[in-house]
Amino acid sequence: MKILKCLILLMVFSFTSFFAFNSYAFPPQTNETSWIATGMNQFRNNSYPNGMVWSITSMEKVPNNPLMHIVWEVSRPPFGALDKIALHRVVSENNAGQGLNHEKVIFVLPGTWSAGGWSKVTDPNYNTLLYLANNGYDVYTIDFRNNFIPDMAYDQFSQNGVDIAAAGDWGYDVYREDIKVCVEKIKQITRESRIFMAGFSRGAIHMFIYSSKYAADLKGLVSFDGGIKDFPPYGNQMDEQTYNFVISLFKAGQLPNPYNPGQMMPLVYDWDTPNTNSWKLAGVMPYAKQLAGGPLPEGFDVISDFVADDAYHLWDFMGLGEGILTKYYDGFIDRNILVAALNEFTLYYPSLQTLESAMLDAYDDCPFLDYDDNDFNIPALAFATTLTCPNGICLIDAIPNMTRSDDVTIVFLEGYGHVDVMFGTKSLKDVKEPTLQWLNNHLQ
């Protein structure tokens, strides 16, 4: 009973924490096909020093933009079917050769379900990665291991021979080292020893955890609604023995799930909506007149209207008001952009990191998790919405920042929802332009 009580407290407090990419010089080509062929030969099968091989899987122009999008994949220990990552690079065609300013390099870490990572939204006024690339930056992002989990119901994994046991070991440390491999690849490409790193939502947690161990790789941090403050400990502490016992139950599929009584906690968890299939359907058929598996409720003309409404109310239960995920009804995001962004979410994320987050919250410096000493001094820019800054708490100077640098700028985005920070109608002026200016001011 004590273990279950600890677990429930652990899950509740972790919920707050959850919310709370050799230089390749492409020679100038007038023939696009020749340009791409040259690049393919130069990028293919480049090895990381430990012997792992990066394989290029895609190289294509970004529609409606003078940009190239290149993707590599690499297998990662322990080299199971799902133990792999992908590195995306988006860079100006004009800057892909000798003229590239290698100081302008940024690696953007996506959040839970890969929100804020690579997106097919092609308007740079909405897509933050494309905006930075169109303004001279060599931009990278990552597909974490969970991106390669098939989109199917959890109980269908075993029926289809999909072994997701490896996900039980996908803690923050595993993702941190995956990020490090990408950073080394980026340094190899750009010949730049220090880069900018940004994180959206949980991606900012990954960014700060990475900074604690590998600060020498970084010259500036940008938190897109992923927090910045180093709050005092709160929640229920466990000693290492109790924590390890809880984790052993979790990996064995025997840990009670406080969110679903009578069920065990899954190795990976899905979105916070029962309408997952309709979100996915809206991404490919935005004007469908029905939901996935049923008719549209009254008051909605097309499925996109329903999905936007679902997203608007998704986190109402948090007690922070309506529109915490997106202020769609308040004009902060275009419906079609919102639906496109939501459709690109991966279906699952490793539960282990949520369990670990609870201990990071409960301790000032968790003695048995090597994640949070925060002994780094890196300039930072942070954007915050009500999700990460309720009641303006992120603006309180007395609360220390995650970085020990005195060069920290915090911007509270009044009225914004979480996703609006990356894809919102007002984000060009409020987020993208200030980010570009801050980055340019911190190049040295």
Image (cartoon, rainbow, N blue to C red):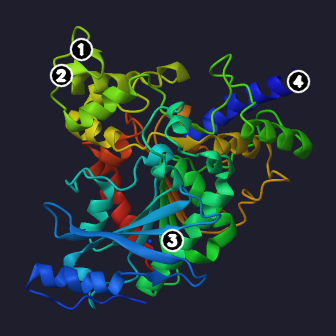
Question: Residue 296 got which mark?
Answer: 1
Q: Mark 4 to mark 2: distance in Å?
A: 48 Å
Among numbered discs 1 and 3, the one appearing first in the sequence: 3
Residue 249 at least partly seen: yes
Whole-number angstrom distance, CA of label 1 to CA of label 4: 45 Å
Mark 3 element type: helix
Residue that carries the numbered disc 4 in the rendered image: 2
Residue at the spot of label 3: 182
Residue at x 63% of width, y 72% of height: 215
Q: Earlier in the sequence, mark 4 or mark 3?
A: 4
Q: x, y percentage for residue 405?
A: 62, 66
Whether residue 219 can be seen here: no
Q: Earlier in the sequence, mark 1 or mark 4?
A: 4
Q: CB atoms at circles 1 and 2 under 8 Å apart?
A: yes
Q: How many residues crowd around disc 2 within 10 Å: few (fewer than 14), some, or many (20 or more)?
A: some
Quadrant (top left, top right, bottom left, bottom right) of the N terminus: top right
Residue visible at 38% across and 23% down in the picture: 275
Q: With 202 as the anchor, is 298 left or right in this view? A: left
Which amino acid, by three-letter code, is at mark 3?
Cys
Q: Which residue is mark 2?
A: 302
Can you give x and y, in whole percent of width and height, for residue 339 in the image?
27, 36
Q: Amino acid at mark 1?
A: Leu
Residue 36, disc: none
